[in-house]
Image (cartoon, helix red, strand yellow):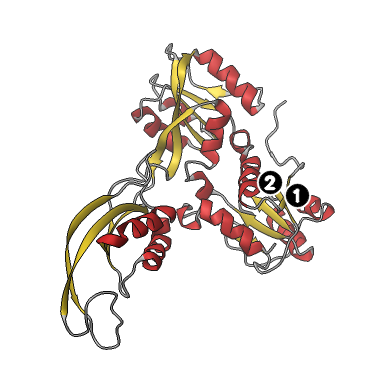
Amino acid sequence: MRIKDIVRVLEQWAPPILQEEYDNCGLQTGDPEAAVDEALLTLDCTEEVVAEAIRKNCGLIIAHHPVIFKGIRSLTGRNDVERTLLAAIRANVAIYAIHTNLDNVIDGVNGEIAARLGLKVLRVLNPKPGQLRKLAVFVPRGHADAVRDAMFAAGAGHVGNYDECSFNTEGTGTFRAGEGTTPFVGKKGERHGEAEVRVEVLCPAMLENTVVRALRVAHPYEEAAYDLYPLANTHQGIGSGLLGEWDEPIAEAVLLEKLKSVFGTTVIRHTSFTGKPIRRVALCGGSGAFLIGKAITARADAYVTGDVKYHEFFQPEGRILLADIGHFESEQFTPALIQSRLARILPTFATRLSKTGTNPIHFH
């Protein structure tokens, strides 16, 4: 299978446009046209991971964290990043990173954490702005169902947990066909009035081109008339962090023990107990201290994340239990999440989970 075909599947799930400005997702090394038989999945790509890929004949490494974050002016092997890249290039091993774009979709990194904890997902904690469009298309009455179905199939029409949502208004459309046209209805040079339906749907910004292409294919007119508007509404499935809850509350001490068990850690840094039971939980994989305020505003009972600094532990002020489970620990299930996705979409493509430990932090 070609690398670009695998990349296409990953980027339909977590489009690169959703990555944060500081990030560098995508193909880091390798030829997108190259064929590979197997991929190695890892949280971090290191020299040791590249060596493992070579031993296992994996022509592609799919990592959560990019190898290249900053500009590289030379490749001389003077640091771990350059040595990793050189090893991959020499062995013709491609490296692909799917990082904050996978953090920013509700069924990505944070969705996997919530699933491991048994939380019922409520919504994204911090929705990413500018991710919704309103698409209105004018269709002959007899073809409205076909165009509506095509837009739904392309990903439009979702509102929260509802799908196939649209608003439909009947009216009369007028037009006059000019030279060089082949009108579906009406005659050239004559104004024509047609009973039409204005079909309105919500459309994710990342899918707008796909949805417009779908409506054009399904639309009977040579020139489909449609309006596309940017919306101030927030997309409920795109953004950082996640909010979930359990049916029954648990004690704070029980939560900490649950976190230790699920994430396999013996140490959890946390704020003082609030004395309140925990039912609603906010979470963010990786470095999530920037969302402490959002977790409090969302009335979460606890916030679970990693990489919290000393002074950031003061921010909750007794309003919420803040638990730092570690950066690696919070994201360790991401390779398995990617493997599951690829197995579902590309069932004949082989993937392996890396056996190389990449957590740079150790506890004694």
Q: Which mark is residue 121?
A: none
Q: Position of residue 138 (x, y in %)?
A: 25, 63
* Residue 322 shown left or right of residue 72 in the figure: left
Kindly give the residue lying farthest to the right in the view shown.
55
Q: Which residue is mark 2?
A: 42
Q: Which mark is residue 49?
A: 1
Q: Position of residue 131 (x, y in %)?
A: 37, 52
Q: Residue at x 40, y 67 (%)?
A: 217
Q: Quadrant of residue 178?
A: bottom left
Q: Quadrant of the N terminus?
A: bottom right
Q: Residue at x 52, y 37 (%)?
A: 110
Q: Nearer the viewer, residue 153 or 98?
A: 153
Q: Is residue 8 above or below residue 118?
A: below
* Residue 16 shown left or right of residue 174 in the figure: right
Residue type at tag 2: Thr
Q: Quadrant of the C terminus?
A: top right
